[in-house]
Image (spheres, grey):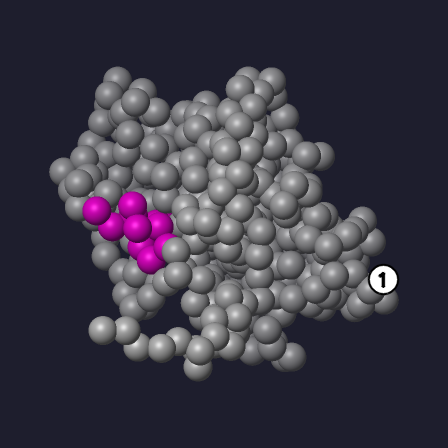
């Protein structure tokens, strides 16, 4: 067998109720379609999960990144779930399916995509992270902490296999260009970009030359699809997903998860228009209710075994993250008290594709020039 591919593809195809959760029958429809794909050999294994109102498809196969067959299968699963969502009159049914016909790849069609292709090691731990009510740049801080911050990842200091650092592929999602920066030597340049999380987004992380893992094999990937850029208007937050490999020359699983022990501020929350803390939660608590939030992240842990996805383990279902959750709720309460004022509400430049411009347009003719 050649290199295995793990594809994590998500879409909001209907909320229950509102933007809170995914109805069980939508998951059942997706499972039915993916089961057929497994029987016909398109994929090796799969799991259907959810985070908030996003339907999440985790699939393993040997067809490589951007496989038309795999993407078509995911699209069919979303279409089947959408049809059921419309029957149930769920909110925003088919919201993330921005086209009526599959065109060979789901990229640019609404769903978020994170895929890794790699040679399966003797032991291959993998974490699928899924966020709701936020944007792709929400992964910038934890990805930096995992692969570049020695205060988070002890292995960067004490493990010779990690000591040389990693390479970060950063996308400018406004100008549609990218740059690759190495750490630790270009750490300050990297931070200068990714601190502006609404524009510069970590897309992939790679080992360096001489690492036991090939330098062209990404060890982490984040979905970077921006829905408003595709649709031309606000149709919902991007709700990113990510895949991270760990152990044996990579950050340990505990170092990967430690990056989420700080509930950092992200953009999104209610109507995609507010800053708030991202809270690591268990699968059962991934329901965004307070002010449609606060933003959530769940973590599904797997072991790969000849393409089989052994798991998942609900990694944030752990009292070790209780303090983080309490802190997130304190921050959520503090931010909420600002109401419609910045910095709780996003700055105007980030509100361009929300519904606010339509409100401001009505006032335009009432403005008078002052000397």
Q: Residue at position x 85%, y 67% from top?
A: 87
| Crowd band around label 1 with a 10 angstrom C-alpha radius: few (<14), some (14–19), many (20+) | some
Q: Residue at position x 51%, y 51% from top?
A: 340
Task: Look at the image and say whether residue 202 sits in the magenta stretch.
Answer: yes
Vertical arrangement, residue 242 with respect to residue 144, above or below: below
Label 1: which secondary element: loop
Q: Nearer the viewer, residue 211 or 319?
A: 319
Report the quarter where the C terminus lies. Answer: bottom left
Percent coordinates x, y for residue 300 in the rendering: 59, 36
Q: Give the residues in magenta.
A: 192-204
Q: Nearer the viewer, residue 266 or 39?
A: 266
Q: Residue at position x 37%, y 44% from top?
A: 140
Percent coordinates x, y for residue 30 in the rendering: 74, 57
Residue situated furthest right in the rendering: 87
Residue 154 in sight from this viewpoint: yes
Vertical arrangement, residue 125 with respect to residue 290, above or below: above
Q: Which of 196 and 281 is in front in this view?
A: 196
Task: Look at the image and say whether residue 242 sits in the magenta stretch.
Answer: no
Residue 281 is drawn in which quadrant?
Answer: top right
Q: In this view, does 207 lie to the left or right of 318?
A: left
Percent coordinates x, y for residue 323 in the rendering: 53, 19
Q: What residue is pinned by disc 1? A: 88
Residue 62 in sight from this viewpoint: no
Q: In this view, does 163 lie to the left or right of 16?
A: left
Percent coordinates x, y for residue 260 in the rendering: 46, 31
Q: Residue at position x 39%, y 56% from top?
A: 347
Q: In this view, does 285 lie to the left or right of 324?
A: right
Q: In this view, does 282 lie to the left or right of 323?
A: right
Residue situated furthest left in the rendering: 185
């Amino acid at each position: 067998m050649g290199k295995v591919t793990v594809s994590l593809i998500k879409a909001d195809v209907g909320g229950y109720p509102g933007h809170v959760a995914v109805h069980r029958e939508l998951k059942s429809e997706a499972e039915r379609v993916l089961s057929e794909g497994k029987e016909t050999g398109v994929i090796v294994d799969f799991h259907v999960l959810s985070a908030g109102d996003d339907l999440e498809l985790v699939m393993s196969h040997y067809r490589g990144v951007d496989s038309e067959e795999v993407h078509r299968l995911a699209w069919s699963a979303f279409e089947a779930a959408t049809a059921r969502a419309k029957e149930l009159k769920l909110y925003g049914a088919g919201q993330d399916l921005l086209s009526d016909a599959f065109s060979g790849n789901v990229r640019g069609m609404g769903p978020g995509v994170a895929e890794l292709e790699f040679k399966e090691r003797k032991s291959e731990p993998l974490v699928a992270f899924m966020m709701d009510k936020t944007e792709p740049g929400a992964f910038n801080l934890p990805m930096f902490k995992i692969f570049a911050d020695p205060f988070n990842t002890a292995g960067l200091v004490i493990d010779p296999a990690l000591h040389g650092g990693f390479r970060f592929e950063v996308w400018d999602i406004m100008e549609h260009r990218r740059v690759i920066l190495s750490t630790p030597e270009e750490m300050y340049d990297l931070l200068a970009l990714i601190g502006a999380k609404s524009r510069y987004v970590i897309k992939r992380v790679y080992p360096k030359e001489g690492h036991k893992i090939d330098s062209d094999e990404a060890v982490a990937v984040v979905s970077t699809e921006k829905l408003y850029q595709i649709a031309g208007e606000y149709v919902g937050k991007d709700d990113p997903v990510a895949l991270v490999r760990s152990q044996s020359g990579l950050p340990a699983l505990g170092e990967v998860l430690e990056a989420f022990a700080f509930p950092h501020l992200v953009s999104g929350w209610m109507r995609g228009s507010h800053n708030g803390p991202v809270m690591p939660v268990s699968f059962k608590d991934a329901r965004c209710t307070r002010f449609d939030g606060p933003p959530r992240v769940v973590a599904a842990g797997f072991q790969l075994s000849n393409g089989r996805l052994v798991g998942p383990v609900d990694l944030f279902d752990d009292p070790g993250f209780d303090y983080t959750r309490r802190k997130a709720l304190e921050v959520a309460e503090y931010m909420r008290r600002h109401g419609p004022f910045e910095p709780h509400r996003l700055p105007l430049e980030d509100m361009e594709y929300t519904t606010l411009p339509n409100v401001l347009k009505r006032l335009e003719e009432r403005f008078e020039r002052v000397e």
